Amino acid sequence: MGRYQSPIRGERENAIVHHHYMERKCLKMPMKSDSIYLPVSEMPAQWYNVLPDLPTPVDPPLNPATKQPIGPEALSAIFPMALIEQEVSKERWIPIPDEVLEILSLWRPTPLIRATHWEAQLETPAKIFYKYEGTSPAGSHKPNTAVAQAYYNKKAGIKRLSTETGAGQWGSALSFACCKFGLQCTVYMVKISYQQKPYRRSLMHTWGAEVFASPTDRTNAGRAVLAKDPGCLGSLGIAISEAVEDAATHDGVNYSLGSVLNHVLLHQTVIGLETQKQLKMAGTTADVLIGCCGGGSNFGGLILPFIGEKLEGKPIRFLGVEPKACPSMTRGKFDYDFGDTAGMTPLLKMFTLGHNFVPAGIHAGGLRYHGMAPIISRLVADKIVEPVAVYQTDVFDAAVQFARTEGIVPAPESAHAILVARNEALRCKRENKPETIVFELSGHGFFDMGAYDAYFAGKLEDIEHEPET
C-alpha cells in the first residue's frame, strides 16, 4: 500500500501534529508510552475491502418481488454510483479521496491506549489496549464513513441527505459531514433516543441538520406505524423506512446509512489499519479483538484488516458483543430479510430478529437494530467471529469501573466491548495467560449521562429477548 502523498504536507502536517499534541497536553490526556499515536503522514491512504478475501462469498442482495439479485440500477435512486461500486467491488484496496483524507486528518489517526491502571486493578497478566474513536468532532467512529458518503453525494450533485439514527451518534456524524460539504441533512431519530439524549439533537442542530422523532407523521411509513401504535418508541428499522421514503420521493435527495452495508464497513477499516501499525509500534500482536455490535460498522472497521491473519492460521479471536435485549447474532436467524420495517429496502442475507422487531428501550440506542451487517453475519456463520450477548446492568458496571481507572466515560454501546474485555482479562488471570486484548472504544459517553444516572439510581432493567418459536 503506497504512502499517502496529498495536500497535507509540510507546514500543514506540522501544524496538525502540533495541534494534536497541544490538545492532548491541554486536556491532560496521557503523554506517555501507554498512548500510541501515529503521525498524520501514516494515515491509511486506502480502504481495505475484505470481500475478495472472504472464504465464503457474501450472498447478494435480492429484489423482494423477484427474489433475484439486484443490479446497480436498483440502488441508484438513493445512492451515488461511486458508493454502489464500492458496495460490490472486488478490488482489495480502494483509494481514499484527498478531500476525505483532509477532513479525517482533523482527528485521525486516533490513539491506541494501553489500559495499565485497569490492568493493575484487575490483576491480570493480559495487556489491554483500546482504540479510542471518541476524539472525532462527533465523538465516535461514525464520521469515518459520514465524511466519505457526504463527499461522494456532493460530487454527484445531491443537495440533501436523509438518514436515521439510533443513539444519535450517526445522525450527529452525518450532520457534521454535510456541514463540511455544504449539504442539507434530515435525520429521523428513534423516538426513545430522541427523548433520552436531547444533547445529541442539539449537536445535530448546531451543524445545521433538521431532526425528527421517529416514527413521524411526515412519511407514509411513519404514519402506518403510528396508526397501529400511537405510543411507539421507534426502532432503527422504522427510522430507516422513513429516511429511505424521504429520499425516494424527493428530487436531489439521497439516503445515507451509518452501518450494515459493505461500503460503510469499508470506510471504517481505517480503524483496524491504524491499529495494526500501532500494535507493531508497541511490539505486540493481538490475541483477542473486541467490539460492540449493532449493525456491525465499528466492529467490522476494527477486525476486517486482521481477517488475513486468522485465515493464515493465527489463533486470533474476534468477539462481537451485542445486548441480550437485541441479540441478532446469538438469537436471530441467518436468512434474507428487509433492512427496514416497511420493507422498502432490498433483501439482505444476515442474522436477523425480523424486520418487524421493535427492541426494548435500552440505553445503548445504537445497538437496537434487528439485523447484522451481511459481512459480519457471514463471518459469524463461518465461525470466524464469536458473538457474545450481555446484560445492560453488567455493561454499566464495567463502564463505571473503566471510567474510574482510565478516566474516559464510554458510550453505553462501547461499554459492551469494555465488559467483554474485562471478562477476557479475568480469564487470562485464571489461566495465567499474558494475552494481548484489543477493544474498540467507539465513542465517549458525554451525551449519555442520563443513562449513567439511571444506573446509579438502580433504575436499569436487564431485558432478555426470547425469540418466538
Image: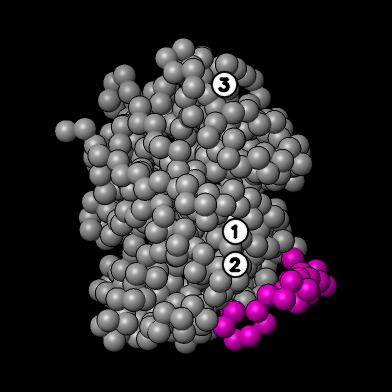
Q: Quadrant of residue 137?
A: bottom right
Q: Residues within 10 Å of mark 1 (few under 14, many from 20)?
A: many
Residue 288 is a magenta residue: no
Give how far apart the Cα atoms at labels 1 and 2 are. Answer: 7 Å
Between residues 33 and 3, which one lies in front from this camera angle?
33
**As displayed, is residue 349 above or below residue 322?**
above
On the image, the x and y values in percent for residue 56 come to 25, 52
Q: Which residue is mark 1?
A: 444
Residue beneath the point at 28% across and 59% down:
386
Between residues 204 and 402, which one lies in front from this camera angle?
402
Under mark 3, the amino acid is: Thr
Instruction: Tell which circle, 1 or 2, labels the residue nearer the N-terminal end.
Output: 2
Q: Which residue is mark 3?
A: 216
Q: SS for tag 1?
A: loop
Q: SS for tag 2?
A: loop
Give how far apart the Cα atoms at labels 3 and 1 are. Answer: 29 Å
Between residues 354 and 275, which one lies in front from this camera angle?
354
| Badge 2 vs badge 3, beta-carbon distance below 8 Å | no
**Residue 163 shows in the view:** no
